[in-house]
Amino acid sequence: MTLRTRLISDLIFPIQERLKQHTTLRVRREMEASQYWPLERLEALRVERLRGLLAHAAQHVPYYRTLFDRLGFKPDSVTGISDLQRLSFLTKVEIRAHTEAMKSDTAQGLARFNTGGSSGEPLVFFIGKERVSHDVAAKWRATRWWGVDIGDPEIVLWGSPIELTSQDRVRHWRDALMRTRLLPAFEMSAERVAGFIDEIRRTRPAMLFGYPSAFAHIARHAEAHRIRMDNLGIRVAFVTSERLYDHQRELIERIFNCPVANGYGGRDAGFIAHQCPSGGMHLTHEDVIVEIVDAQGRVLPHGESGEIVVTHLATRDFPFIRYRTGDIAALDDQPCACGRTLPLLKELQGRSTDFLVAHDGTVMHGLSLIYIVRDLAGVKQFKIVQESLERTDILLVTDERFDQANLVQIERGAKARLGQTVTVNVQLVNEIAPERSGKYRYVVSKVAT
């Protein structure tokens, strides 16, 4: 670790977090100790924290106070994680229907977030400072597993407007101080990708962070144009937000000459798991209770694949208790060679977001169209299907809150990105069926990139 990195990691970043009233540094230090605890001790910590979360929800969160009363559920009766099974699941439908009632009456300074959700089902929710502190600490811990730290030069390739619209002067100087360079993943034209490659070569980052599909696209461009990216000293590429395919891992590792560290989680469910250098996808076990359930909602034993259900223990301000993610995976009961006792996630089949191709050949991330529709009032589900360069269908399932004038807005927004000559069919449908595999995809492009 260089002196500058140590200064940022040990002094400047902790000061920033304290100014934000976050407890990130303390939580990270606690996590770095607990990751080696015996499982029995970890389990005792989780049960204690679970009782605390449930007791707070019963007293301060209207939605859970009503739910617990209806079920006759008493938080002080909880003696183990399995007692969670006495509660019903939390779904996106429930959150949308009871958003205000899910806020704790003690919450202050809640931040509003949204996500596309399964099959493009918009979801608006809120996160408090406790949750932010724990999520940042969990990511920070995992970053340090790979011999890099906050303050090492970093390239972030991302597409969320939460990040990309906050590039004001304060954010610009903060990123410069932290040595983080944010690149927009929306547009992946040949010209833009060439600029990204130049920026990465100039920066010579210690780490990359972003979508696996985006880094694989950059790697393909660099390889096709015989641009070396393997001599920059990049130590690790952290990828998240999409399913990581084997061919993407191989390509990124070969072109950038660094290992790929897969991460799994989301804005809604939190930082759930991260890969260590020994290959294990370790759960953030101190913060997140993961259940794997079948189609009937029954909890499955380790080794069997099913839907991931999450209870995040640092969400008192807006509790996520038995939250159905829609993702498929299995739990592994084998220990990891790294020596950490944090249990493992395996056979992760997370959703992936395809690229779209504009009429002029510009390749862009699917999120460039997702953000046009996902947060519109009254949109319950959506799916974007690019049939060809000349035609894209946008399917919408809506309710009475949907304004028909938005149909024109959606079409205009899509044409602005895909090309004015492209036929954009915005269709209102009664339902959106899953793929043959049973999984939902909210962007499907039939155009080769």
Image (cartoon, rainbow, N blue to C red):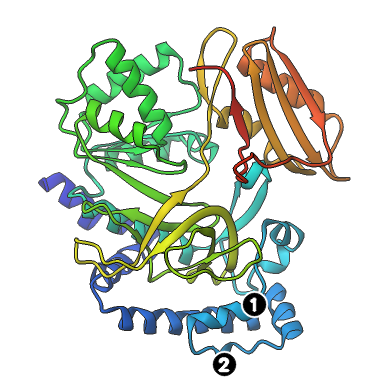
Q: Is 190 on the left-hand or right-hand side of 394? A: left
Q: Is 405 on the left-hand or right-hand side of 5? A: right
Per the rendering, the mark at residue 147 is none
Q: Is 428 on the left-hand or right-hand side of 113? A: right
Q: Position of residue 390 (x, y in %)?
A: 67, 10
Q: Position of residue 91 (x, y in %)?
A: 67, 60
Q: Position of residue 449 (x, y in %)?
A: 48, 17
> Is residue 121 in view from this perspective?
yes
Mark 1: give few (<14), some (14-19) or many (20+) Cα within 10 Å. few
Mark 2: give few (<14), some (14-19) or many (20+) Cα within 10 Å. few
Rendered image quadrant of residue 67: bottom right
296, 155: nearer the viewer: 296
In percent of the image, x 30 and y 12: which residue is there? 224
Give the SS element for disc 1: loop
In percent of the image, x 45 and y 20: which residue is there? 188
Q: Which residue is mark 2?
A: 77
> Is residue 111 in view from this perspective?
no
Rendered image quadrant of residue 48: bottom left
Disc 1 residue type?
Leu
Q: Is residue 260 depicted above or below 21 in this figure?
A: above
Disc 2 residue type?
Ser
In percent of the image, x 53 and y 43: which residue is there? 351
